[in-house]
Amino acid sequence: MKPSILAESLTFWRSWHFRPPTASTARTASCLPWRSTGASATARRQGPVWLVFSRDTTMYAVSADSKGLDTVVGLLADVVLHPRLTEEEIEMARMAVQFELEDLSMRPDPEPLLTEMIHEAAYRENTVGLHRFCPAENIAKIDRDVLHSYLRNYYTPDRMVLAGVGIEHDHLVECARKYLLGARPAWGSGAAVDVDRSVAQYTGGVVKLERDMSKVSLGPAPFPELTHIMIGLESCSFLEADFIPFAVLNMMMGGGGSFSAGGPGKGMFTRLYLNVLNRHHWMYNATAYHHSYEDTGLLCIHASADPRQVREMVEIITKEFILMGGTVDVVELERAKTQLMSMLMMNLEARPVIFEDVGRQVLATRSRKLPHELCALIRLPVPVPVPGDVRPEDIRRVASKMLRGKPAVAALGDLSDLPSYEHIQAALSSRDGRLPRTYRLFR
């Protein structure tokens, strides 16, 4: 039923504390920055306080002056463990979720919806294939008892990590003991029941959504009617050794929109730009994505074009998948490795990204690989190959293994010319990636 969606909407609400305000919470304003930065939601104290729900994690975050660490940890403990969840708040959250669902169906950017659809196709009715967005018919069914049941099952100490950046470790441990150790949550201390511990089962398949995409423009200027296709294959989890070769392969494929401004670091020399967007002017988008989880992974390509050229677009993408298992040029491989390391180091310049990285790694692996350790796994070229160095044969190996699996297909828009799933599967099993020929007696 997705109670996590309402939990997200209710976090940092105007009556965010279960307990009455104290001198500690009253001092929150003095330790939080006055202005909100970035794209985070802003709490009533006007500090960057936000919550992020993804498919496999939930992150509560606060950016504040390090002098207010004690107050901030107390605030986070209150928000996580002592939400009020009044009927008024729940009703407002229901309205917010309903609005977000309506907004999702009207957005000109199809990527959030396509990402949902490709996961649903790849992992039919299990784990990461379950809907991330709450079905509209279930919104009214989620009440305080349902939310407490969800929190009781999944907000347990063995599933939590407290991470901090720019602070003393011993001080953070002291604050954790003060506010989290032995704390009694608002939903009681009952044991968790009905916790889903199943492992992701990749199934492959197709999910299609016929929709009129001719009226998605947000302004007076018309937006071209496009059909969006996403094709994916199972890769590996982030705990496996092949995760790094898959990350390099994803960077090597790259891609983007046909109206990218280009420039250094924009990936204009990636395969999807050189082989697809530069050669087929009618393609509006061709982008590779790699989704990786604790027990599975999915590498996919999203493409957009005019509905009359859907079949040709699908064949171009299947050919690119087949080429992944072919010859890998040393220059393009080194470029992809360098770009991956550059992106890794650039992202870790921001402190919010660092503590998200720390939290996610420790939650998944109970340890954290430092940036230089990750770069050593990617490795720049050296005269003699060393263990951990990603080589052309590694790319061919992981790509060939991936191509032996069933594809997952998501399609959105006018799908009258979409090839059948069987034809797409046959193309990915062939040597050249061509779709089987179809013949019509009448047109």
Image (cartoon, helix red, strand yellow):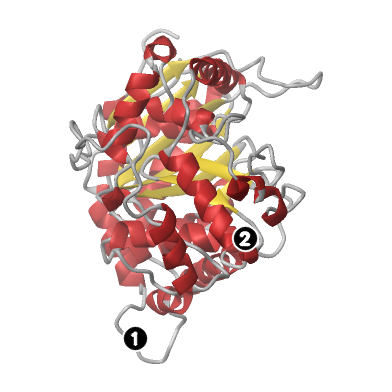
The amino acid pointed to by label 2 is: Gly
- Mark 1–mark 2 Cα distance, whole angstroms, equals 49 Å
Rendered view: 162 above or below 198:
below
* Quadrant holding the N terminus: top left
Q: Where residue 409 sits in the image (x, y, percent)?
A: 36, 31
Rendered view: 350 above or below 80:
below
Residue at x 60% of width, y 30% of height: 109
Q: Are marks 1 and 2 in contact (CB under 8 Å)?
A: no
Report the disc number at residue 423: none
**Element at badge 1?**
loop
**Nearest the eye: 114 or 187:** 187
Left or right of 98 in this view: 156: left
The disc, 1 or 2, on the residue closer to the chain's N-terminal end is 2
Judged from this view, the residue extending furthest toward the bottom is: 383
Left or right of 203 in this view: 319: right
Mark 2 neighbour class, 10 Å CA radius: few under 14, some 14 to 19, many 20 or more: some
Residue placed under numbered mark 1 in the picture: 385
Residue at x 50% of width, y 48% of height: 76
Discs 1/2, front? 2
Q: Where residue 100 sits in the image (x, y, percent)?
A: 56, 22
Would residue 70 be seen by someone viewing this image from the given angle? yes
Q: Where residue 393 sits in the image (x, y, percent)?
A: 30, 70
Would residue 229 be seen by someone viewing this image from the given angle? no
The amino acid pointed to by label 1 is: Pro
Residue at x 62% of width, y 36% of height: 284
Q: How many marks?
A: 2
Q: Where residue 297 sits in the image (x, y, percent)?
A: 31, 49
**Element at badge 2?**
helix
**Nearest the eye: 11 or 302:** 11
Residue placed under numbered mark 2 in the picture: 68
